[in-house]
Amino acid sequence: MSTALRIAYGTFGRVALLDMDRSLVRHAHPHCHVLLKAEGEDTAFAVGDRFIPLTDSQAVLVNAWEPHAYVHDPLRARTTILALYIEPMWLQAIRPNWAASGGPGFFDQPAGEVTPRIRDLGMNLATVMVSDPAGRSAQEELLSDLMISVIERFTPWRTISASLALRADLQAFDWRVRRAVDLIRSAPSTRICVDTLARESGLSRAHFYRLFQRTAQVSPHVYLNVVRMELAVKAVVDSSDSLAVVSDTLGFSAPAHFARFFREHAGVKPSEFRVVSRMGLA
């Protein structure tokens, strides 16, 4: 079973040090997503329609809202992965045009060769997370240096323009897709079907599905799961509600279904995620 060794959570988003021995379902995040191998066997991710190895010398780079999945080879041993889920507004405070990390095309390739500096910063961050879970200042400083190094190496950040940042803004959505997104966000606990979303948008099911996929970069089903997962993470970390209450609030028919959904997207059960993410707050 996969294990969360440490999880740091804050305005920067979250950073997870995960000891992985099982695959994850195809999913997405509203974050700039960087994956670095810390220890163990080489492994791989499916990013879009490409199979991308994760090795000591290669990072996996996933744009916000880009569908991807972790692909674990059951014949191989575990892999410890440093997974970064970085909020675009936190990056914007470093450089204004880095708000574009919340949209498509920020990374022009799903993989990149790791420099010695990126490798050292990643390992230092993982080490501090393990040895000093409460050292949030040191963790965030290392994370900032790491993300600057990653973005400067793997993105055309000097030429990213306001037009790309605009593409990251939900206001740029087609108004019919915007209506569907508003419906999803207003009632994430409701298992809204595609037919209902299409009807509310005034489109046929097939036309709506194509328009949503083209505009949002993901299917309506994946988008709903992203919204529910981000709400789940926030509730698991920040609230004092029992996991049964969180499950019910998010519309799951049983806590076991919620636990399976969470594990399939995050790699670990929500109970473990809650304990590990609060280590530095005790």
Image (tube, rainbow, N blue to C red):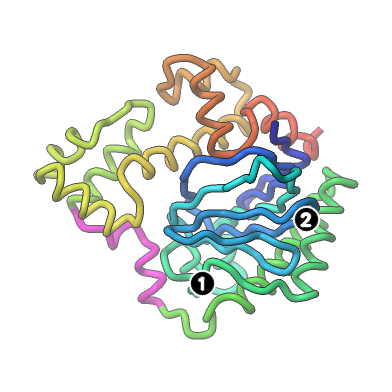
Q: Residue 125, how many percent across, how many down? A: 80, 57
Q: Position of residue 79 (x, y in %)?
A: 74, 48
- Residue in the picture at 32% in, 55% down: 216
Q: Main secondary structure of the magenta part?
A: helix
On screen, residue 18 versus residue 133, left or right, reads left
Relative vertical location of residue 205 with respect to residue 151 in this rendering, above or below:
above
The three-letter code of the residue at mark 2 reads Ala
Image quadrant holding the C terminus, namely: top right
Q: Identify the residue position indicated by label 1 in the image.
A: 109
- In the rendered image, the residue lying farthest to the right is 131
Give residue 146's quadrant in the image. bottom right
Residue 7 in view? no
Residue identifier under label 2: 38
Percent coordinates x, y for residue 81 in the rendering: 71, 51
Q: Earlier in the sequence, mark 2 or mark 1?
A: 2
Residue 166 within the magenta-colored segment of the rendering: yes
Q: Nearer the viewer, residue 70 or 144?
A: 70
Q: Quadrant of residue 250?
A: top left
Query: Is 218 included in the stretch rendered in magenta?
Result: no
Q: Please give the range of residues in magenta.
A: 162-175
Q: Is residue 152 left or right of residue 62?
A: right
Location of residue 189 in the rendering, given as x and y in whole percent from the top left corner: 38, 27
> Label 1 is placed on what type of residue?
Gln
